[in-house]
Amino acid sequence: VATVQAETAYTAVDWTQPSALIIGSEAAGAGENAQRLATQQLTIPMHAATDSLNAAVATGILLFEAARQRFKNS
């Protein structure tokens, strides 16, 4: 689960392992069920004046990092 409050940057996650990515709404984030299922919280570091990202943009950033890690040695 990606959240502003998390301490782990998305680039520090090992995306080469099997993963599930749940995207919540921009206003409310991931729901309670998703939070319970999550084994890790991560964040996309942003400039202090930015309070959130569009859900589609955040998804693109996370999926790009997963692909980068999985295919960097191909």
Image: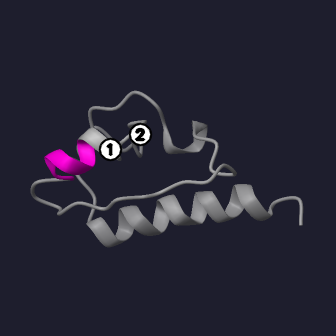
Q: Is residue 44 magenta?
A: no
- Read off the residue under disc 1: 37
Disc number placed over residue 42 in the picture, else none: 2
Q: Amino acid at mark 1?
A: Leu
Circles 1, 2 touching at the beta carbon (< 8 Å): no
Please identify the quarter of the rendering in which residue 69 is found: bottom right
Which residue sits at x=40%, y=27%?
7
Position of 58 with respect to 20 (left or right) is left
Q: Nearer the viewer, residue 73 or 34?
A: 34
Which residue sits at x=39%, y=41%?
43
Which residues are the magenta region? 30-35
Q: x, y (%) of residue 20?
A: 47, 57
User: In terms of secondary structure, where does tag 1 sit?
Assistant: helix
Position of 18 with respect to 55 (left or right) is right
- Where is the C terminus found, in terms of image quarters? bottom right
Which residue sits at x=81%, y=60%?
72
Residue 66 seen by the camera: yes
Q: x, y (%) of residue 38?
A: 36, 42
Q: Nearer the viewer, residue 16 or 47?
A: 16
Q: Residue furthest left?
A: 27
**Rendered position, 37 above or below 40:** below
The secondary structure that most of the magenta stretch takes on is helix
The type of colouring in the image is: one colour
Q: Amino acid at mark 2?
A: Leu
Residue 3 seen by the camera: no
Q: Is residue 33 magenta?
A: yes
Please identify the quarter of the rendering in which residue 13 is found: top right
